[in-house]
Image: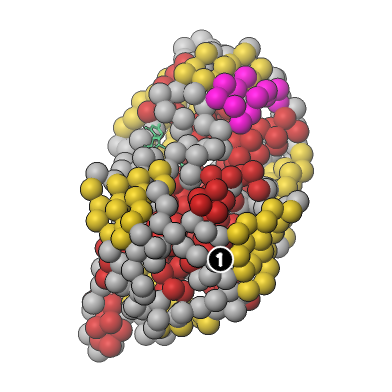
Amino acid sequence: MVCEGNNKSYLKSQNLKIIGPSTLSGEVKISGAKNSALVLLAASLLTDEKIILENVPLLTDIEKMGNILKNLGVKLQTQDHQLIIDSSNISIKELPYELVNGLRASFFCIGALLARFGQASIPLPGGCNIGKRPINEHINGLKALGAEFIIEKEIVKAKLAEKKSRLFGANIRLNCPSVGATETLIMAASLARGRTVIENAAREPEIQDLCQMLNKMGAKIYDAGKEKIIIDGVQKLHGCSHKVIPDRIEAGTFLIAAAATLSSITVSPVIPNHLEAVLNKLEESGSKIIKKGNSISIRGKSIKAVDVKTAPFPGFPTDLQAPFMALMTIAKGRSKISETIFENRMTHVELLNRMGSSIIVKNNIAQIDGVKKLKGMTLVGSDLRSSAALIIAALISNRTSRVFGLDHLDRGYESFEIKLAQLGVEIIREFNKEFISKSDKSKSHLKKNLSEFEAA
Ligand code: EPZ
C-alpha cells in the first residue's frame, strides 16, 4: 500500500535510493489502469445499485477519488484490490476544494451527477504542472445536452435548463479529442432522453473500458473506441461487477526501463494492442518484442535514436513521453521528441541534463543527442510521469541516486519500487525521520542535499 500520507507532502520525508547501473530480469505484474479506475468510480454515481470493481490499483489518486465519493455519501468497501461502491443514498452538495484539489478526474463526476440528479457543484480543477488543463469541451458538451452553468468563486455550478426534467440527447463535435470530456459526455448522455452522437471523440482504451461497464449497467453505447460514439439514453442504470483493464502506461514504463538497461523482462497482464505505437518505437530503436496472449516480453539489445511525436490514441501516448525520453538520452545518434498534447510536459529535461544528458527543447520539441552514461544524483520529480523518467535515468546511471517527490509517483504507480526490486534492481524507499520543517534549522544536512536541486 502506498505510504500513509495524511496529506503531508512527501517531498522531503521520503525518497527512493537507487544504485545504478541496473539490469532487470523476470516478470512484473501490471496493476489495474489508474485512468480507467478513476472514471469507473465517477460512473458508479449513475446508479443507486451496487457496483463491484475488481483489479483496482492501490494508488493515492484512487484514495482521493474514494474520499470525494464518500463526501457525497457514497458507501465504499475496500477489500485488497476490490472496491464495492454503494451510491444509493447520496446527498448532492458542493464538493470541498481541499478534497478535489490536485485530482483532475474529480471533475469527471459532473456528468454523472447532472445525469442522475439534474445538478452538480464542483470546484474548477485548475491547471497543474503539465498545463492549463481547460474544461471548455466538458462545459460546451454538457450545455448541448441541456445543462446550464454558473461559475462563481472557482466553483462550477451546473443544473438542468429551465423546465427540463432530464438531459436530452444532442449531436456534439469536440474541437479536440479530450479523454476527460469524452468520458464526461458519455456518462451524461447515458441517462439523457434520446440519442447523443459524439464526433471527434477520444479513443483511449480507458474510454472503451468505461463504455463496457456502462453497457453492463444497461446503457446503450455503440462504437466506443471509434471517433464517432453513439449513446441512446435510458431511464435507469443498474449495478454490475467489472474488472479494470491493465494499466498500459505502467506496462509501457517497465518495457522502456528494460530497453534502457538492455534487460529482458515480461510484463503481464497487458493488452498488447493498447501499446502498439510504443512497441513499434521500441522495436525501431532496437529492442526485441514478443507478444503472447496477455503478456509482452522484451529483450533490450541496442538503443538507436528514434523520433517520437505524441498523439491521441492510437498514437504514441503523452504519458510515456517522459519515460521514453530517458531511454533516448543514451541512444546512438540524435532523436527528436515532440509533445503535442500538453504545453508544459518537459519538466524532466533540466534534471536529465544535470545527469549528463544532452537535450535542447524548443517549442515543445526536444532534440536529444545520445551520450554514453548518466551520473546518479539527488533528483525531484514534479509530476507523475517525469518522476518515472528520472527513475529510469537513475537505473541507467553509474552511481547512487535519490529520487524525491514521491507524492507524484505514488499517484500513478502501485508499489513501483517493490516491483523494480523484484526485477533485480537495488532500490529502497528511505524514510527521513527528521521531516525538515522550515522553522527547524537544526536538521540541515538533508536540506543541504535537497538545496542542490529544484523539482524537475
Ligand atoms: C487524461 O487527462 C488522463 N488523465 C491524462 O493522464 C492523459 O495524459 C490525458 O488524458 C491525455 O491522454 C485521466 O484520465 C485521469 P485531455 P485529460 O482532456 O482528460 C485539451 C496521467 O499522467 N483540452 O485528453 O485531462 C487539453 O488542454 C494523466 O496519468 C481542452 O482544450 O486530458 C490537452 O491539451 C496526465 N479542453 C488536451 O485537450 C478541454 O475541455 C488533452 O487533454 C479538455 C481538454
Question: In this orientation, which residue lies closer to the viewer: 250 or 25?
Answer: 25
Does the Cβ of the disc 1 residue fall within 8 Å of ligand 1?
A: no
Residue 198's spot in the image, x, y percent? 54, 20
Residue visible at 39% across and 66% down in the picture? 330
Q: How is the image coloured?
A: secondary structure
Give the residue type that dot 1 points to. Answer: Gly
Q: Is residue 245 among what the camera can see? A: yes
Q: Which residue is mark 1?
A: 300
Q: Is residue 109 among what the camera can see? A: no
Check the image and report above or below for 443 versus 270: below
| Crowding at mark 1 (Cα within 10 Å: few <14, some 14-19, many 20+) | many
Q: Which residues are magenta?
A: 219-230
Residue visible at 47% across and 52% down in the picture? 320
The magenta stretch spans residue 18: no
Residue 430's spot in the image, x, y percent? 46, 82
Residue visible at 30% across and 52% down in the picture? 366
As drawn, is 138 to the left or to the right of 268?
left
Residue 356's spot in the image, x, y percent? 29, 71
- Ligand 1's image quarter is top left
Element type where label 1 sits in the image:
loop
Residue 228's spot in the image, x, y percent? 57, 21
Q: Which quadrant would the C terminus be assigned to in this image?
A: bottom left
